[in-house]
Amino acid sequence: MENKEAKKYLVFSAHPDDLDFGCAATVAKLTSEGNEVIYCVLTNGEKGTHKVDQSKKQMVEMREKEQRAAGAAVGVEEVIFLGEIDGNLEHTPEVCKKVIRVIREVKPHIIISQDPGNQTFDNFYRFHRDHRVTAEIVFDAIYPAAGSKAFFPELVEEENILPHQIEEAWFYGTERANISIDVSQTIAKKIDALRCHISQFEDFDLLEKHVYEHAGDHEEKEKMTHAERFRRISF
Ligand SMILES: [Zn+2]
């Protein structure tokens, strides 16, 4: 669909599958409306298994393949992997530079990521260390670093990768949502995306039930049957 208002979105997550839980139905809606969406996954996700017979290399390859298929299921053609070690993500200048490079090269209007504002530690999945660190790295990369030549000037001087200022950030998996996206028409695509993560789940029917329940549990039921919720901040 041609859309003159089309925007470019860049979605970050710590592991393969985080962003599918967080926003795949919204991504399906955005791409169906003619927007471009690109994914960037910080870690390899190689520890996301209880199967000890899998080698690390096999696991990395499998999870990349699964995430690319999940992206394709919702209209995402490009998935960038930063290759950090699952469970050991650190907020270092090196990792920040990688994230800033991606933001400056992709030049999105809007970044979607995990929420650095989540601080209650009342849920083990949500507060996985890699999720917290990813949320902070992306937040710090957005402002001020990605838009300022003063940060990592060598990217400009040596590679002509120019600073880029985004318009908005949307945080998924948030505890303080301020926007709801009506995904009633695309929630089935989210299930398709989640079903691509074959290495991660055993009971996909139960997973589907939980996803529908979660998407139906919001405060705007009169306006939309299923929603994904975000905390949006603008510049
Ligand atoms: Zn995760």
Image: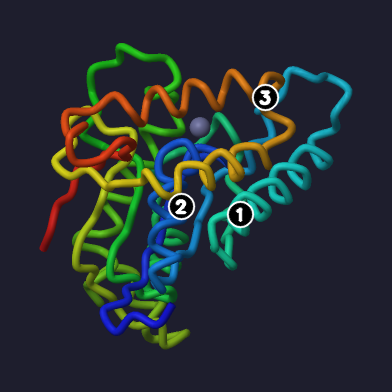
- Residue 93, horizontal then vertical, whole percent: 39, 53
Q: Residue furthest left?
A: 235
Q: Amino acid at mark 2?
A: Val
Q: Is residue 100 above or below residue 6?
A: above
Q: Which amino acid type is marked by label 3?
A: Phe
Q: At x 67% / y 28%, what residue is drawn?
A: 200
| Residue for point 36% across, 71% down | 8
The residue where tag 1 is placed is 73
For the residues carrying marks 1 and 3, which lies nearer the camera in this image?
Answer: 1
Q: Which residue is mark 2?
A: 95
Q: Where is residue 68, by image quadrant?
A: bottom right
138 w.r.t. 97: above or below: above
Q: Amino acid at mark 1?
A: Ala
Q: Is residue 85 left or right of residue 65?
A: left
Q: At numbered mark 2, what does the secondary structure look like: helix, strand or loop?
A: helix
Disc 3: which residue: 201
